[in-house]
Image (spheres, grey):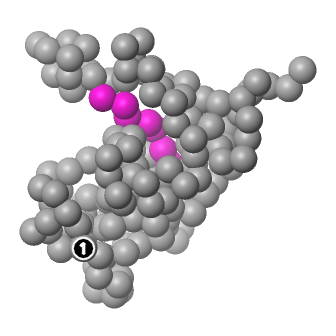
Amino acid sequence: MTTSPTERFEYIEADPLLGSASALPYAPITLRFGGRETQVSALVDSGSTLNVLPYDVGLQLGAVWEQQIVPVRLGGNMADSEARAILLIGTIRRFAPIRLAFAWTRNNRVPVIFGQTNFFMEFDIRFCRSELFFEITPRGKIAS
């Protein structure tokens, strides 16, 4: 019998006054860039086209804004925020590290976001909102 490569996470309540009505799917991840790393919680957002990295998190990792030269266009409520492409290495719990492409934005009012490109291309996600948990499985791995 093999162990499942799936990791389960609980939804996190954003507002204690609202309780489970405010719960959102956040996953812990260690991000690396160059020789630095930081641990953050990222919103797993199937409606987001891109992975998004707030400005301060990029600075914590030692990234230099002027060295990231590929512009990225953001949509929705972040459409007026300047963003640039940046590649990071991410590790979620016991999964192998993966390369993640982010739109690094000068906006600090957003969380780290996992979107379709490329988080959902690397992982399969199973949301169980009514039970307040979600599961992440690396691409190509079949949960038993």
> Horizontally, is 33 left or right of 64 in the view?
right
Location of the N terminus (image quadrant) = top right
> Horizontally, is 106 left or right of 32 in the view?
left
Residue drawn at (43%, 54%) of the image? 116
- Mark 1 residue type: Arg
Residue drawn at (9%, 68%) of the image? 80
Q: Is residue 87 above or below residue 32?
A: below
Q: Nearer the viewer, residue 120 or 41?
A: 120
Q: Is residue 27 above or below residue 50?
A: above
Question: Residue 72: where, in percent of width, then height?
Answer: 29, 76
Q: How many marks?
A: 1
Where does label 1 land, which residue?
73
For the residue labelled by badge 1, is the local secondary structure a helix, a strand or a loop?
loop
> Horizontally, is 59 left or right of 40 in the view?
left
Residue 28 lies in the magenta stretch? yes
Location of the C terminus (image quadrant) = top right
Question: Residue 95: where, in percent of width, then height?
Answer: 66, 43
The magenta span reads 24-31
Question: Residue 102: where, in percent of width, then height?
Answer: 39, 64
